[in-house]
Amino acid sequence: MKAARLYGPGDLRIEDIATPGLPDAGWVKLRVDAAGICGSDLHNFRTGQWISRSPSTAGHELTGTVTAIGAGVDAFAVGDRVVADSRFWCGNCAQCHGGRRHLCVSLGFVGEICDGGFAEQAVLPARLLHIIDAGLDERVAAMAEPLAVALHAVRRLPKTAGSVLVVGCGPIGGLAALLLSRTFAGTVLVTDRNQARCARVAQVTGATIVDLNRDAIAAATANAPLLAAIEATGSVAALNQLLGVVDPGGTIAMVGIFHG
């Protein structure tokens, strides 16, 4: 089968590799239907920061169809359509047993600890999979993981804020703005250096476009304090500007990957 395999920084090869055999106990084999390219994939390709195996098949934003199940797997059947948790957690440590899988003592990621979705087939632990509606477009389903990131950020914001500012209108920031437009009663503000991208997000969500400065935000909020923001750029310069416009007592949910 074809797979995109990462050997090192800047060294990505499309190769023919062996098709996975029957999955081990507790694992599931998938036909990959779609996989998204995360900003972290680009960062890892450029820098090699998270390469722990070489070669490895990246791709943690994936959706697929179950083609085989290992022994002991009873929550899935052949033909089920699924999406995957990007985090590879053990399920055995105290943190996992306490429901804090993101703090697993051996936490890794799909595409790092095990091969991911940049291949025609993948084999993943059943514990990482979630069944989705059979009629959902695979291109939409592949966005489940970034949507979950955006949803977590939105849920961390204070419920009493009158306005929320989203800095960065890439996939995560755009999805956060979309969620806010459906769930938040106050004013949603968006800003991005890429004016076309910012305009697209504003058009889809009804958000108000602002410059990242105190005067512009004060005008958009009728001088009400800005107490909630989402930083989705990973830019140190943007974060410094954001710190200058969020009022005392405000909350910033940081989802950008900082490279500095």
Image (spheres, grey):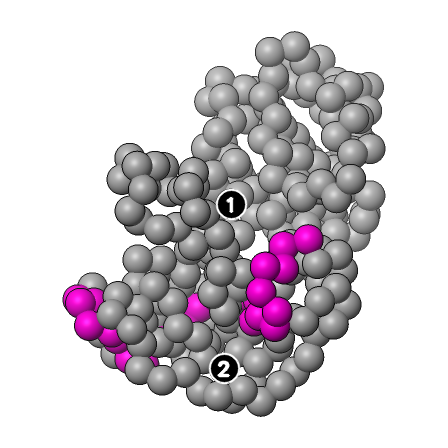
- In the image, 52 versus 60, the foreground residue is 52
The kind of secondary structure element at disc 1 is: helix
| Residue occupying image coordinates x 36% and y 84% | 21
Please state the horizontal and vertical placement of residue 172, each as a whole percent of the image.
Answer: 60, 48
Viewer-proximal residue among 56 and 173: 56
In this view, 25 is above or below 188:
below
Residue 61 in magenta stretch:
yes
> Crowding at label 2, few (<14), some or many (≥20) Cα neighbours within 10 Å?
some
Residue displayed at 48% across by 42% down:
151
Which residue is rendered at x = 71% and y = 63% of the image? 45
Instruction: Say whether residue 81 is left or right of residue 260.
Output: left
Which residue is more in the foreground, 111 or 239? Answer: 111
In the image, taking residue 10 as reference, residue 52 lies left or right, namely left
Res. 149 mark: 1
Q: Please report the bounds of the magenta region as a residue range.
A: 49-74
| Residue 220 picture location, percent across and down | 72, 24
The C terminus appears in which quarter of the rendering?
top right
Question: What residue is shown at x 57% (from left), y 48% (from top)?
Answer: 175
Q: Is residue 185 left or right of residue 123?
A: right
- Mark 1 burial class by Cα count in 10 Å: few <14, some 14-19, many 20+: some
- Does 256 sit left or right of 121 as displayed? right
Q: Position of residue 251 (x, y in %)?
A: 58, 21
Would you place residue 182 above or below residue 213 in this image?
below
N-term mark: 1 or 2 = 2
Task: Give the labeled residue for mark 2.
Answer: 120
Quarter where residue 55 is shown: bottom right
Residue type, mark 2 in image:
Glu
Query: Could one spot residue 61 in this view of the protein?
Result: no
Distance Cα–Cα, label 1 vs label 2: 25 Å
